[in-house]
Image (cartoon, rainbow, N blue to C red):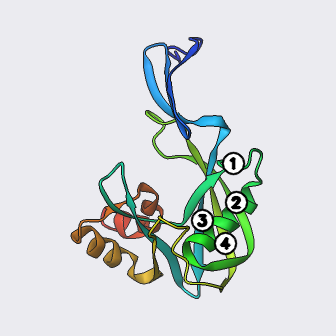
Amino acid sequence: MDHFDHDSPVETMWEGRFITAKRKGRWEYVARARGIRAAVIVAIDSGHILLVEQYRVALGRACIEMPAGLIGDETEGEDMMVAAARELEEETGYRAGRLESLGEYFSSPGMVAESFTLVRAHDLVRVSDGGGVEGEGITVHRVALGEIAAFVEAKRAEGCAIDVKMLMLLSAALLGAVI
């Protein structure tokens, strides 16, 4: 298999605080700056999943997502599980008794070098209202697992964007239509 531009040097075309635009041979892509990583948290509590709704500037509208956050954006070398626990509590108001890594994934590898680690939160306890840090304006949704497809369609009808990672939760409903 031929890997076009595999040996080409990487050129940084632009770099901001959180992202960089790069070129490698004829390919252009975006990456996180300074080794920043991300964690996405699957938080299921008594048959309900915790989801967040947050305005996303890049989309120009609110988006339905699983709780998530950056690792190492404020503290270099930050532990991924510590960051995931912090983000879960900040965004949703729930604290996990235990966190488990479910592996690293890439959301749009043809355009973005960013990966995220999927983390499963166990033994959840509600400790606050959540909503994120000042200025995030996060709305927390606790949705019954059996009602996810209807919830997503209702939010889509309201004009919300739906994060691609929500496909994981919708897969049975979507695949059931073709199987």
Q: Amino acid at mark 1?
A: Gly
In terms of sequence position, does the residue under pointer 1 or pointer 2 come before the other? 1
Q: Amino acid at mark 3?
A: Ile
Q: Are marks 1 and 2 in contact (CB under 8 Å)?
A: yes
Looking at marks 3 and 2 on the same chain, the residue that comes earlier in the sequence is marked by 3
**Residue name at image x 55 percent, y 77 percent:** 130
Do we see residue 67 in this rendering? yes
Residue under pointer 1: 72
Badge 4 is on which residue?
121
Up-down relation of residue 25 to residue 80 (above or below): above
Q: Amino acid at mark 2?
A: Ala
Q: CA distance from mark 1 to mark 2?
A: 8 Å
Where in the figure is residue 123, as x and y percent of width and height?
A: 71, 82
Q: Which residue is mark 2?
A: 83
Q: Are marks 1 and 3 in contact (CB under 8 Å)?
A: no
Give the alpha-carbon distance from disc 4 to disc 1, as whole Å.
20 Å
Which disc number belongs to residue 41? 3
Classify residue 152 as left or right of residue 72. Answer: left
Dot 2: element: helix
